[in-house]
Image (spheres, helix red, strand yellow):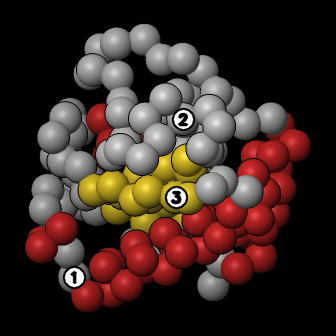
Amino acid sequence: MLKRGCNKCDRIKKRDYFFENDSVVAYFSRPDFRGHAVILLKSHKEKVTDMTFKESHDLMDALIKVAKAIEMTIKPDIINYQFNMNWVRHVHCHIYPRFKDTDKCWGDPICIPKKDARFTKQLLTDKEKAKIVSLVKPRIT
């Protein structure tokens, strides 16, 4: 069930994601981390502990599939995974590809701009996005 006024629920309605299973969708996000993706629970749940077993399984399945596709495409040195519900109370997980030579916070936790700050864009090319999508889509069950 979606919640009125939740920007993550509104995101689901837009249908601008590249992966979907029964419980989650995935989309590319924060332009300050090249290849950053979000796995977003379709139903509005505010805490990870509110998820059903199936939702938690589907979330982890999507997380692994999307991360593998990102690894195969842009070959980050490491990937960080982050669950936050600070700004938006809707279960979602971030996938942050990290690159030793360009990451200003290499070796530290993710450094994201403040809530309303501008981003330094590090965008995926259209070719990279297409490859990630092609690697993930055939695995949708």
Name the residue located 47 percent from the left edge and 41 percent from the top edge: 106
Q: In this view, does 135 lie to the left or right of 27?
A: right
Q: Mark 1 points at which residue?
A: 52
Q: Distance between the residues labelled 3 and 2?
A: 12 Å
Where is residue 37 shown, x and y percent of the image? 53, 49
Q: In this view, does 14 lie above or below 62?
A: above
45 or 69, nearer to the observer? 69
Q: Where in the figure is residue 10, as x and y percent of width and height?
A: 36, 39
- Which corner quadrant of the image does residue 123 belong to? top right
**Residue at horizontal 62 percent and vertical 32 percent from the top:** 102
Tell whether label 2 touches label 1 (CB within 8 Å). no
Q: In this view, does 102 lie above or below 137?
A: above
Residue occupied by mark 3 = 79
On the rendered image, what quadrant is the C terminus found in? Answer: bottom right
| Earlier residue among tags 3 and 1 | 1
- Residue in the image at 32% along x and 78% along y: 55
Q: What residue type is labelled 2?
A: Asp
Query: Rounded to the nearest whole Å, what is the CA distance between mark 1 and mark 2?
Result: 36 Å
Task: Point out which mark residue 103 bears.
Answer: 2
Relative height, residue 8 to residue 81 (above, below):
above
Callout 1: few (<14), some (14-19), or many (20+) C-alpha neighbours within 10 Å?
few
